[in-house]
């Protein structure tokens, strides 16, 4: 069975009208095989369908991109300042950690030097208190006395503004003033490590 090509074209393209002479020379069967006349109308249909499909493929594979807003000078300045503040805080934290370790080392080594039996010394606790006016290391220790018993005591090592150092061992008044019932950073493990190294060296 055959049909006029114009009918086929109109069913595909709707309101597009082709010259009537194409109808006279183009006939196709339902299988789409040209049996008579020119094939120009079918070629046009194929071309239009190809354009339609290429548009769908293009929109699927290459979707339209949304432009991102450009950063404003004010936002850039804020980001730069935030980075500067972060770096400054990190530097300050590193410097503080170094200072705290220094006072922890100081109090352990000074107390170790004052012991009669250095090899018997142990670190019970070690805390560091960081204040604007001074950084203080508070050490609680134990060691053998001259009679073979164990004495427990305290030591305070302080670094004040201007690089002024202060050390006192078994000074209850200073301990109560600077260390007693005060919040501190725990450096007990650091103190024990320092003591072990000192005892190894003898």
Image (cartoon, rainbow, N blue to C red):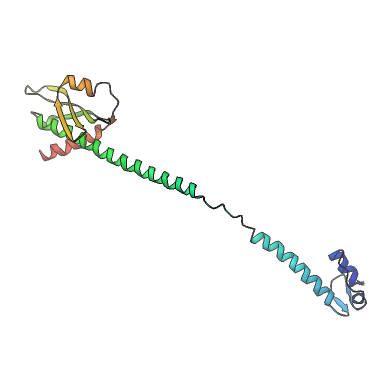
Quadrant location of the C terminus in the rendered image? top left
Question: Residue at image x 64%, y 61%?
Answer: 61
Q: Position of residue 131 (x, y in %)?
A: 27, 30
Quarter-wise, where is residue 180 in the image? top left
Please, which residue is most extreme toward the bottom here? 37
- Taking depth in this image into account, of 59 and 177 the one nearest to the observer is 177
User: Would residue 107 appear left or right of 49 to someone viewing this image?
Assistant: left
Question: At which x and y percent is residue 153?
Answer: 16, 23
Judged from this view, the residue extending furthest toward the front is 73
Q: Specify whether 6 is left or right of 68.
A: right
Q: Residue at x 18, y 22 (%)?
A: 174
Residue name at image x 14 percent, y 25 percent:
169
Q: Does 80 sit above or below residue 29?
A: above
**Foreground residue, 120 or 16?**
16
Question: Could you tell me which residue is drawn at 24 percent across and 37 percent down?
Answer: 99
Using residue 68 as the reference point, say whether residue 19 is left or right of it: right
Q: Nearer the viewer, residue 134 or 188?
A: 134
Position of the N terminus, as image quadrant, is: bottom right
Left/right placement of residue 145 relative to residue 125 reads left
The count of marks equals: 0
Residue 166, quarter of picture? top left
Q: Position of residue 193 (x, y in %)?
A: 21, 37
- Looking at this view, is 84 or 111 the one in front? 84
Measuring from the top left, give residue 73's x and y in whole percent. 49, 50
């Amino acid at each position: 069975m055959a049909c006029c090509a114009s009918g086929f074209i109109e069913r595909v393209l709707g309101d597009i009208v082709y010259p009537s002479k194409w109808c006279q020379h183009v006939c196709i069967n339902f299988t789409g095989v040209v049996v008579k006349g020119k094939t120009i109308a079918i070629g046009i249909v194929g071309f239009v369908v190809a354009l339609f499909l290429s548009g769908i493929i293009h929109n699927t594979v290459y979707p339209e991109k949304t432009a991102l807003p450009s950063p404003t000078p004010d936002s850039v300045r804020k980001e730069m300042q935030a980075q500067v503040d972060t770096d400054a805080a990190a530097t300050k934290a590193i410097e503080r950690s170094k200072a705290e370790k220094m006072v922890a080392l100081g109090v352990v080594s000074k107390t170790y030097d004052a012991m009669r039996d250095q090899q018997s010394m142990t670190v019970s606790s070690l805390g560091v208190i960081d204040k604007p006016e001074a950084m203080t290391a508070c050490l609680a220790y134990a060691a053998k006395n001259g009679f073979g018993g164990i004495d427990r005591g305290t030591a305070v090592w302080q670094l004040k503004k201007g690089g002024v150092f202060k050390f006192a061992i078994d000074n209850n008044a200073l301990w109560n003033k600077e260390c007693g019932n005060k919040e501190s950073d725990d450096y007990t493990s650091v103190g024990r490590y320092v003591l072990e190294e000192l005892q190894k060296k003898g």
